[in-house]
Amino acid sequence: MVAGVGGVSAPGRVLIDRRRIAGRVDAMASEIEREYKSCRDAVLFVPVLDGALLFAADLIRRLSLPLQLAGLAASSYPGAATTSTGQVELGLFRVDVQGRRVLLLDDILDTGQTLATVKEALRQRGALEVRSAVLLRKQRETPPVVEADFVGFEVPDCFVIGYGLDHDGRYRELPDVRVLDQDNMI
Ligand code: 5GP
Ligand code: MG
């Protein structure tokens, strides 16, 4: 444990610090802007909640594009679990996506089940195009079932927290991405 923000201690060790995150999010914003600058209609940005909240907030403030924002809740890690159940539960999504260009934002791409499930749901509702941007992509033995179009950082296959990522609902507010080792898992 080390001292974190506001005197609260943060577990694990820093994997990607806040400066590197900020630099990479800047670069991703430029890549995304280039891709979409010729679109006449507002792109619909869909952060996968709650994990993508911080990434989405930082990314969209760097963009100069006509865009709309509509979060979608998805979960596949019940409670203190550190491996996915493989079953993705989606929350309510009331936005009309018919004919829209959608960019999904997620904190981390692991098995790819979350992005695959959300993509399929939006396509079924008539989205014209569904692409995705993830801050982190786990380097797994088995590749994810879908790839992301924009990736911030490749990370080792371990459980990470901070900058939106939680463990059992905690640590999302930590400004750096940290690796939670076995000793820190309750
Ligand atoms: P996937 O469906 O690709 O296996 O997993 C994606 C979702 O699982 C992410 O949106 C994230 O919420 C969660 N997840 C995957 N790996 C991690 C991790 O290392 N740490 C945390 N906190 N969440 C993870
Ligand atoms: Mg998530």
Image (tube, rainbow, N blue to C red):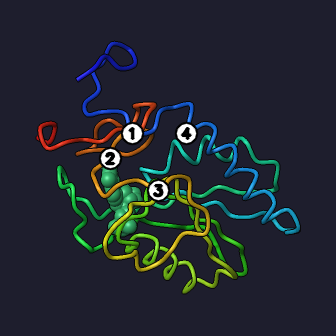
**Neighbour tally class for label 4: few under 14, some 14-19, many 20 plus, Cα within 10 Å:** many
Of labels 1 and 3, earlier in sequence is: 1
Residue type, numbered disc 2: Val
Residue at figure coordinates x 64%, y 60% from the top left: 45
Q: Element under label 4?
A: helix
- Is residue 73 rendered to the left or right of residue 55? left
Residue at figure coordinates x 31%, y 16% from the top left: 3
Q: Element under label 2?
A: strand
* x and y, in percent, of residue 60 in the image: 68, 47
Of labels 4 and 3, earlier in sequence is: 4
* x and y, in percent, of residue 100 in the image: 71, 75
Of labels 3 and 2, earlier in sequence is: 3
Q: Which residue is mark 4?
A: 21
Of badges 3 and 2, the one in the foreground is: 3
Identify the disc placed on residue 160: 2
Residue at figure coordinates x 21%, y 55% from the top left: 82
Question: How far, Cα to Cα, is label 3 from label 2?
Answer: 12 Å
Of labels 4 and 2, earlier in sequence is: 4
Q: Element under label 1?
A: strand
Q: Which residue is mark 3?
A: 154
